[in-house]
Amino acid sequence: MAKIIAGIGSSHVPAIGAALDNGKTEEPYWKRVFSGFEKSKEWMAKTKPDVAIVVYNDHASAFSVEMIPTFALGCAAEFPPADEGWGPRPVPVVKGHPALAAHIAQSVILDEFDLTIVNKMEVDHGLTVPMNLLFGQPKDAWACPVIPLAVNVVMYPPPTGHRCYMLGKALRRAVESYPEDLKVVIFGTGGLSHQISGPRAGLINSKWDKSFLDNLSKDPKKLTRIPHLEYMREAGAEGIEMVMWLIMRGALDDKVDEVYRFYTVPASNTAVGHIILENARKASGTRKVAGKSKRGSAGKSRQAAARQPTYRIASKGKR
């Protein structure tokens, strides 16, 4: 059966894409940002997922005020990069996985989560920037097929953190009922704290961001209780994007191994956050995490006995 083996949280700052596209990655301002993802690219190259589910928000590229789906699942065979006003990004066309996407749509909808099924869609920086940060800059094709899941966090009302977390659990059930043996990683993108307009433009709340990352790893259910107004007040108007990370987290085990974390400010006017979480191995005995041995947890997942071996990155980023 297919398995979700890990979750990745990443900001999707459009200026990061511009820095990549214009050869500015070695400039001092940008080098500190991109250096924080070097270990992540090594991890991804070792993990070699068969499919990536990327949870992101569209920035008026595929959707507009005329049509605002809360959750939209890309089921097409490919997704071209969108023209966001200055031409499409020079990245490969994103190849989809229509069979798995159709299976997810059926499973999740019958699990009483209403999805919009999208069979033609362009994808913008919200999806392609995190792909670059984890997979690098391929010339011809991305390393694996991608299933986009667009979430409305632009127009009120966005989904609650709890709804997103529970959707993650439904996604996991869907993936694990797919018969093909596939390794799947899931991205939660957007954020962290930032506000791009109004009197508080430029707001960054590092204390809030780091607490969010701590709880994402250790106590995600606490995050599901955060109301929209608290995101707005503490993390800025665009900080509501962080609910998308809870879809990723809901798709993982209750107990996870935090493989790597990176945080820096600013990139453009945004806090950049990144985390890699792996489902803990369920074998008896010990497992090594960052050089220390810990006893494996029995876990309560129905698929506890079917975990794949995972890879560790010993050194963690700054918190």
Image: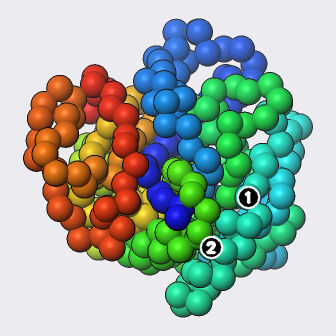
Dot label at residue 104: 2
Q: Residue at x 78, y 35 (%)?
A: 141
Coordinates of residue 183 in the picture (x, y in percent): 53, 51
Question: Dot 2 lies on which element?
Answer: helix
In the visual, does 231 lie left or right of 199? Answer: left
Residue kind at label 2, given as amino acid type: Ile
Q: Is residue 311 visible?
A: yes
Few, some or many C-alpha atoms within 10 Å of disc 1 (few <14, some 14-19, many ≥20)?
A: many
Q: Residue at x 79, y 49 (%)?
A: 95
Residue 193 in view in this figure: no
**Lateral position of residue 75 relative to residue 268, left or right:** right
Q: Which residue is mark 1?
A: 97
How far is the residue under mark 1 from the one under mark 2?
11 Å
**Which disc, if any, is residue 44?**
none
Q: Which residue is painted at 83% across and 53% down in the image?
A: 78
- In the rendered image, residue 215, in percent from the top left (x then y), is placed at 24, 54
- Dot 2 crowding, Cα within 10 Å, few <14, some 14–19, many 20+: many
The answer to the question of whether label 1 and label 2 lie on touching residues, with beta carbons closer than 8 A, is: no
Q: Is residue 224 above or below residue 59?
A: below
Give the x, y percent position of residue 298. Answer: 17, 62
**Element class at badge 1:** loop
At label 1, the amino acid type is His
Q: Earlier in the sequence, mark 1 or mark 2?
A: 1
Residue 319: horizontal and vertical position, in percent?
Answer: 26, 33
